[in-house]
Amino acid sequence: MNYENCQSAWVPGFGKRYAIYYQDEPLEVEVWSFVRKGRRRRNQIAPKPIKQLIPFLRHGYPSLGLSNGSNSKKWCSIHRLLYIAFIAPIPTGMLVRHHDDNRLNFRLSNLKAGTYQDNANDAIRNYKLKGKKLGCPALWNRGQVRLMVTLRRCGWSYARIGRLLGSNNKRIHAVFSGKLTTYARWIKQMTP
């Protein structure tokens, strides 16, 4: 990491025990410990970084075990640390969500605070969950489905229709194969 071109901050809530470094292009995040180990100097704060902490996946999110001077560790996910350190404190009752639902994308522009419902809506928008599970409204209206039917009759591929409507070919194919029952009924009503 090029430390001259990166942002740095102390990890909030841990005093000056851990520093976090963030660089957007190329995306890099490093967390360094300033805590000395050993019998004599246990839990003393060093004037310079001692060791780089290596995150590991915990529930699918890269996380670190950080200590506040006691023997217990607090598990912190990297995206929450970045949001708190560089954007703002997380409001009560909110969570930090990945706008693109990629748990490994830590760009500050991708991290947003929101409710659980906002996070679920992101998952539906990014095709991470099926809309039926959450009872979401239809993705397309009757006019758009009529357009799909017309374009399909004109020989358009599922992928081409998907690009036009901002979707993917699997979702369009599901409409025509009858897997999405609401749209299947509409298509049946539209065909002579």
Image (cartoon, helix red, strand yellow):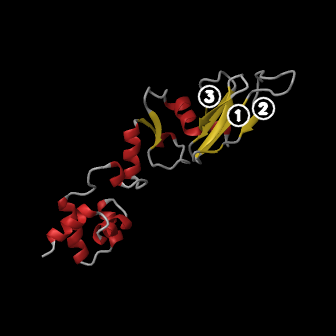
Which numbered marker is on residue 147?
A: none
Q: Which residue: 27% across, 78% down?
A: 155
Instruction: Tell me the SS state at disc 2.
Output: loop
Residue 165 x/y as whole percent: 29, 61
Q: Which residue position is annotated with label 2?
A: 50
Residue 157 x/y as whole percent: 32, 74
The answer to whether the residue labelled 1 contacts the one labelled 2, judged by CB atoms less than 8 Å apart, is yes
Please tell me how crowded label 1 is: few (under 14), some (14-19), or many (20+) other residues with Cα within 10 Å.
some
Front in this rendered view, residue 151 or 134: 134
Residue 192 figure quarter:
bottom left
The answer to whether the residue labelled 1 contacts the one labelled 3, judged by CB atoms less than 8 Å apart, is no
Q: Which residue: 20% across, 72% down?
A: 150
Task: Specify the amino acid type for callout 3.
Answer: Val
Q: Which residue position is annotated with label 1?
A: 32
Q: Is residue 151 above or below residue 30?
A: below
Please tell me how crowded label 3 is: few (under 14), some (14-19), or many (20+) other residues with Cα within 10 Å.
many
Task: Specify the amino acid type for callout 2.
Answer: Ile
The CA distance from mark 3 to mark 2 is 15 Å
Residue 73 x/y as whole percent: 68, 30
